[in-house]
């Protein structure tokens, strides 16, 4: 059965409007961090589909290309570790990640239900550094199996589950800051190109006025 916002409200003994505003991250609505945590935790436990939240979807699930190494552990429903190894997290969002270059002992996915644990590795590099996410472990479930990436490696699209509001906020802050830094870099590069173009036009105009120059 599809879980709706009323079910979350009933479970927490809250008004549905309160739940709706918290899930939509309404900037005009103020709620305590404890209440927000309760709502998002309950939504995760009940299996609420966050993609049904239309208004903030683009912002909430904006992705950041990171191409960062991570540790991978595949765990069965009974808690048994099926396999482990390392991979490359190609992109990251609050909702999940795209994982490629997976290297584990068995190199196969289990046939029964399983979850994947992704551990972010401390790594200095492009600002903001992944050090801000160092030690964070994301519990995931597989939602998409892509044929292969450009380099021929299979890719797994995973969705974060059981994530706390604090962890989601850490990821969101990282994604937003990475996007801001890249936008500033792109704007600066565009300004440099524009300046070079203007300088070239001035030189060409000056050359046209030299003796013997062509106008």
Image (tube, rainbow, N blue to C red):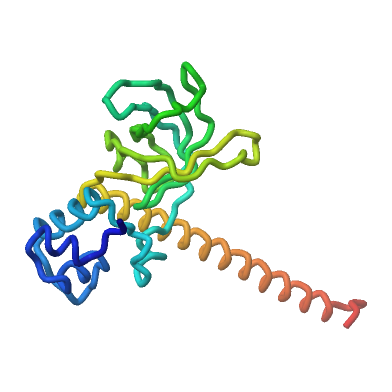
Q: Tell which of 117 and 205 is nearer to you.
A: 117
Residue at the extreme top: 105
* Among the 4 quarters of the image, the one containing residue 148: top right
Is 56 drawn above or below residue 155 in the view shown? below
* Among the 4 quarters of the image, the one containing residue 60: bottom left
Quadrant for the N terminus in the image: bottom left
Q: Tell which of 140 and 70 is nearer to you.
A: 140
Is 129 drawn above or below residue 1 in the view shown? above
Residue 174: x and y in percent read 34, 51
Is residue 122 visible to us here?
no
Residue at the extreme front: 1
Residue 87: x and y in percent read 47, 30
Is residue 7 visible to us here?
yes
10 on left or right of 167: left
Residue 144: x and y in percent read 49, 44
Quadrant for the C terminus in the image: bottom right
Could you tell me which residue is drawn at 9 percent across and 56 percent down?
A: 34
* Among the 4 quarters of the image, the one containing residue 172: bottom left
Q: Tell which of 21 and 129 is nearer to you.
A: 21
210 on left or right of 51: right
Residue 94: x and y in percent read 34, 52
194 on left or right of 168: right
170 on left or right of 13: right
Labels in figure, total: 0
Could you tell me which residue is drawn at 67 percent across and 70 percent down?
A: 199
Could you tell me which residue is drawn at 18 percent across and 67 percent down?
A: 19
């Amino acid at each position: 059965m599809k879980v709706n916002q009323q079910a979350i409200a009933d479970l927490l003994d809250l008004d549905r409007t309160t739940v709706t505003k918290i899930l939509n991250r309404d900037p005009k609505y103020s709620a305590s961090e404890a209440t927000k945590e309760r709502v998002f935790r309950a939504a995760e436990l009940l299996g609420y589909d966050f993609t049904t939240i239309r208004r903030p979807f683009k912002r909430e699930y904006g992705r950041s290309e990171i191409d960062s190494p991570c540790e991978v552990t595949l765990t069965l429903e009974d808690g048994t570790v099926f396999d482990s190894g390392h991979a490359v997290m190609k992109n990251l969002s609050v909702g999940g990640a795209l994982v490629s270059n997976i290297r584990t002992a068995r190199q196969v996915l289990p046939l029964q239900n399983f979850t994947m644990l992704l551990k972010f590795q401390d790594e200095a590099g492009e600002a903001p550094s992944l050090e801000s996410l160092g030690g964070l472990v994301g519990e995931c479930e597989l939602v998409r199996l892509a044929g292969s990436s450009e380099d021929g490696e299979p890719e797994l699209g995973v969705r974060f589950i059981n994530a706390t509001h604090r962890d989601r906020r850490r990821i969101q802050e990282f994604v937003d800051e990475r996007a801001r830094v890249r936008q500033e870099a792109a704007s600066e590069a565009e300004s440099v190109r524009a300046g070079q173009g203007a300088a070239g036009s001035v030189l060409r105009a000056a050359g046209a006025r030299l003796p013997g120059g062509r106008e």
